[in-house]
Amino acid sequence: MGACQSFREMCDREKNTNVRLSLPAICVVWQTAMIILFGVFIRYDHESDAHWVEHRKHLNLTDIENDFYFRYPSFQDVHVMIFVGFGFLMTFLKRYSFGGVGFNFLIAAFGLQWALLMQGWFHSLDYTDGKIKIGIENLINADFCVAGCLIAYGALLGKVSPVQLMVLTLFGITLFAVEEFIILSVIHARDAGGSMVIHTFGAYYGLSISWMLYRPNLHQSSRLQGSVYHSDVFAMIGTLFLWMFWPSFNSAICDHGDGQHRAAINTYLCLASTVLTAVAISSLFQKHGKLDMVHIQNSTLAGGVAAGTAAEFMLMPYGSLIVGFCCGVISTLGYIFLTPFMEKHLKIQDTCGIHNLHAMPGVIGGIVGAVTAASASVEVYGHEGLVNTFDFEGKFKDMVPTTQGGHQAAGLCVALCFGIGGGIIVGAILRLPIWGDPADDNCFDDETYWEVPEEEEEGIPTVLQYNNHMRNKDIGEEQQINHDPIRSPLAPSYAPLHQHLKGGGDTIQARDMNPRRGDKNRAFTPVSQQRPLSGTL
């Protein structure tokens, strides 16, 4: 802890260096490297190669038995989640929508190429010719790999440069490929929907980096840490895309048939239960029973995260509802209590609240998977069902469900270790003063890295005060009162005007007193209907 703090202070002293890595140069160099590496290593697998016709005739197969027809619908759903769902979910900040969607796009396109190589070397390498053979399932797994880095980005949203994001993605995908190989191949844990491999790893990876990049003066950008009405609506679009396609995410790489079918059902029910619970807890803990949009945007997805590991197990429909219920409670309470605690006492500034949406539900999903696997029996699964569901074949043919439960727990520990340890190491690298990260007073602002069109003054919306992304709530309310001709301390000076307007104070339009206020719900008295004020002032 002390060594990390000393390293952070040393890097802060070096922030005035003139050495900066250029984003265009990094993009060009990286893409050139990918072209070379793909040319050396990547080839089509037998189902996407032109020799498929010969292979099909030799095995007496039909085109419909090509894996493309089984996997492509799920791949498209996962693809939409990565580029649209995650992207729009990060647009809640009032001045960082370009960065939310645009940098999400950059990370995903940058990372999926490296993911195909890294995962290919571990899982798809043909030792007869030294080539990586890729098909539709490799594309799905590459999207899964990128998802872990996008989750980590959520903790750092608005506080890092695009170059830092590319470095985060480069190391994140490398760590992901290693921990995935250890968990799935060495330990032999099952994790179809990635509660451990994707969500737990990605969340703690991002949180650890956020701790290493802690900004004690981030309050200088507090004016931009809130949302506005339209930005929350755009973020809700991302939520709905994620919510609808999450059954495909958890079932995309399951075995054909009952495994995929069961995973979709379990995830579907888990998500539905989470929505009702999140709405109930949000209303219960908010003033006047109102709902907080932050909870609806995020906590409603927690059930899909937790259902990932046990998605293809015999969790049972009622078990899925129980998991979703618990996640809705824990995730929503996390946004209310844990996020402020973590920033104040643990020095972890979690912009999107990934600890509540991915970290805690991911751990819950790993625990549920371990318990469900350990309690599996021949009566519930059948002998062939046990072998098929838990892949009790080869060197694992003598494994029993109780042992499998222990392996599941070990997989969760590996994900936590790689996420926290890897995040600390990568965070230390990202503190080096060469990445061009934004100053404390320029965070959460698109103008730092984007050409932003000028905004007309009348189009500036009022900041939503209910949103707990807004840190200066009290200041905002005070400003509203000071500009209100009825509640303001200057109200007596408005009295002569007030008595000569039809309908009294309710007819005073805010634009007459404060042209920046956009309150459209109060009546406006046209000039032609106002009585002359001569002799009254």
Image (cartoon, grey):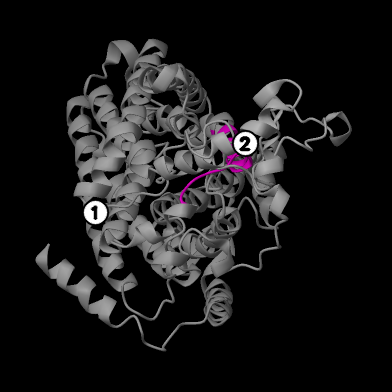
Mark 2–mark 1 Cα distance, whole angstroms, equals 47 Å
Reading the image, the residue beneath label 1 is 347
Q: Position of residue 414 (x, y in %)?
A: 22, 48
Considering depth in this image, is 363 or 123 the residue closer to the camera?
Answer: 363
- In the displayed structure, would residue 344 be above or below residue 521? below
Residue type at mark 2: give it. Answer: Tyr
Quarter placement of the C terminus: top right
In the rendered image of this protein, does residue 512 appear above or below residue 499? below
Query: Which residue: 57% across, 31% down?
Result: 486
Q: Is 438 or 402 nearer to us in this picture?
A: 438
Type of secondary structure dominating the magenta stretch: helix
Mark 2: which secondary structure? helix
- Relative depth, front residue between 325 and 62: 325
Front position in the image: 304 or 468: 468
Is residue 58 among the parts visible in the rendering? Answer: yes
Q: Earlier in the sequence, mark 2 or mark 1?
A: 1
Q: Residue furthest front?
A: 535
Looking at the image, residue 84 sits to the left or right of residue 419; the answer is: right
Please name the amino acid that badge 1 sits on: Lys
What range is drawn magenta here? 225-242
Q: Residue at x 47, y 21 (%)?
A: 290
Local crowd at mark 1 within 10 Å, few (<14), some, or many (≥20)?
some
Residue behind mark 2: 494
Confirm whether the magenta stretch covers residue 235. yes
Quadrant housing residue 242:
top right
